Image (tube, rainbow, N blue to C red):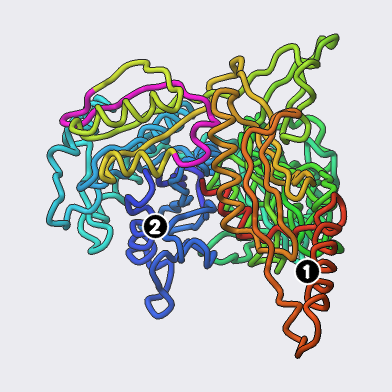
Amino acid sequence: MAITHIRNFCIIAHIDHGKSTLADRLLEITNTVPKRIMREQMLDTMDLERERGITIKLQPVRLDYGGYVLNLIDTPGHVDFTYEVSRSLAAVEGAILLVDASQGVEAQTLGNLYLAMEQGVTIIPVINKIDLANADVERTRREIMQLLGCEPKDILAVSAKTGEGVLAVIEAIKDRVPPPAGKETAGFRALIFDSQFDEYQGVVAYVRVVDGRIRAPAKICFSATKAVSEALEVGIFKPQRLGQNSLEAGEIGYIVTGLKDVRQCRVGDTIMSFGDRETAPLIGYREAKPMVFAGFFPAVGDQYELLHKALDRLKLSDAALVFDPEHSSALGFGWRVGCLGLLHLEITQERIRREFGLELTVTAPSVAYQLWVKGSHRSIIIKSPLDLPEQSRIERLEEPWVRLDIISPKDYVGGIMQLVASKRGEYLNTEYLDDRAILHYRLPLASLLVDFYDKLKSTSAGYASMDYQFDGYRPANVVRLDVLIADEPAEALSQIVYRDAAYERGRQVVGILKSTLPRQQFEVKIQAAVGGKILAAERLSALRKDVTAKLYGGDVTRKQKLLKKQKKGKKRLSEQGRGRVPIPPTAYLSILKQ
């Protein structure tokens, strides 16, 4: 296919604005997928995506229409998967900006739009769901015009559900999106924008061919890792993998590399022909910065290596995931896993459970703090509360802040401002988009971790939406809150909290544990402490066992003797190290959700 007849584009939007549905209609109209096997959310390949109704992984597919090749990459919408969107945008020349006619422009619409503008791709604004009874097409058109400064005729209106107007979108892609700028006669270069692992074929790299051509079999090398391998097969996505004779400049497809070590094929690396030293590598991607960290420990101790293998495989298709070894005296060996947000963390945990059959114990999430120890001129990153040294050794501690954008109807602005203020937010300014307000704030990332999104939806009756971006580090007055159960430290429950909120959080944690821990044969003390100071405490009463039930008569001293023996046994168990209290997974989950 001539490079002038290739169009590469992706669909970007706020979550639940109809990206997957529009992709379904494009597949139908171009006859890419036969009607007999067509289903809803065709490009959502994971069961988890279908159950939750969200796109988690980007998915490429090739559409053939009117002598043109249209390479589509369907992208996620949730803020936690922004890195997937940025990688997709780096591989294309155009983007469909999809906006729900009933919801209008929302926070992640803005976030994804700014990403597209940074990449310099051509933007085609499209209003979706015009068939809904509450659709307000004119208001949505005005909002898009304010954002893009475009003309009304540039904005297309469609119903992805019924197919109305979708053909006009295809024509707009042909007419407005420029062809790729690669050189067909230059040395082979391809950008890896995603990958997966196949048990039989090894690593399969999803690539955008920038220059040249590749035929299989061919010897290839990887610019960053210096790995050398052989391209066993090349092909395109229809949407399943379909082998081809070659991949040309400007095309999107896959290369079966045969690599068994997943670390040799990195997202953002350049694949080149082996021995072609004159070809310069591509720029690649900006590395993702995980902001939320939690400990992943296998429920069964001997599954540590299996968990390592599972994380390695996930890392291959999720470049934003990072992990380092961690050890806990209570939970054994595990991994400190870094993700972009709480949903990303939850999805990672669920994928490990489903795809690899591993049950996990996950510790309370925390953000990455920057620490300067007295006497040291370098900062270190604190990913776990257990890494925080004594207060006397800390010279300076900084926490990550984010720039937060909230879009809401004007009626709820007052309540939202109170909510953000209670979460230590700093107000910047307010913009207005027709009858809605865009509130701009700076906020500590730790304030978003627990229940901010739920409270935002509650305050705005479900209408508000939010998007955030990392905005640097600032000094933080925080301490480590330790939890002791039966005088034994429960390391997995340690948290880093603000000093002025430590007492309140301590009361909350011990209250949750009192209601979730199983009762024992002895009285259990539950305490929250900072340093050596106990801030809050509860007692879990002992189980009552009737040791006199077997008596059938005799002197009262027999009864007193058995009760005295029971009392001594309970006292012995309650001594430190004698009576260990198992912490059920429900206790961890209850604390995570508060």
The answer to whether residue 217 shows anywhere in this view is: no
Question: Is 437 inside the magenta-drawn segment?
Answer: yes
Above or below 430: residue 283 = below
Q: Which residues are magenta?
A: 432-451
Percent of width and height locating residue 560: 79, 72
Q: Secondary structure at mark 2?
A: helix
Above or below 133: residue 33 = below
For mark 2, does the 10 Å Cα neighbourhood hold few (<14), some (14 to 19), or many (20 or more) residues? Answer: many
Above or below 358: residue 365 = above
The residue at 59%/66% (across/down) is 242
User: Which numbered tag is attached to residue 200?
Assistant: 1
Amino acid bearing label 2: Ser
Percent of width and height locating residue 390: 79, 23
The residue at 83%/78% (across/down) is 558
The residue indicated by pointer 2 is 20
For mark 1, does the 10 Å Cα neighbourhood hold few (<14), some (14 to 19), or many (20 or more) residues? Answer: few
Amino acid bearing label 1: Tyr
Mark 1–mark 2 Cα distance, whole angstroms, equals 30 Å
Residue 420 position by quadrant: top left
Is residue 296 toward the left or the right of residue 149 in the image?
Answer: right
The answer to whether residue 350 shows anywhere in this view is: yes
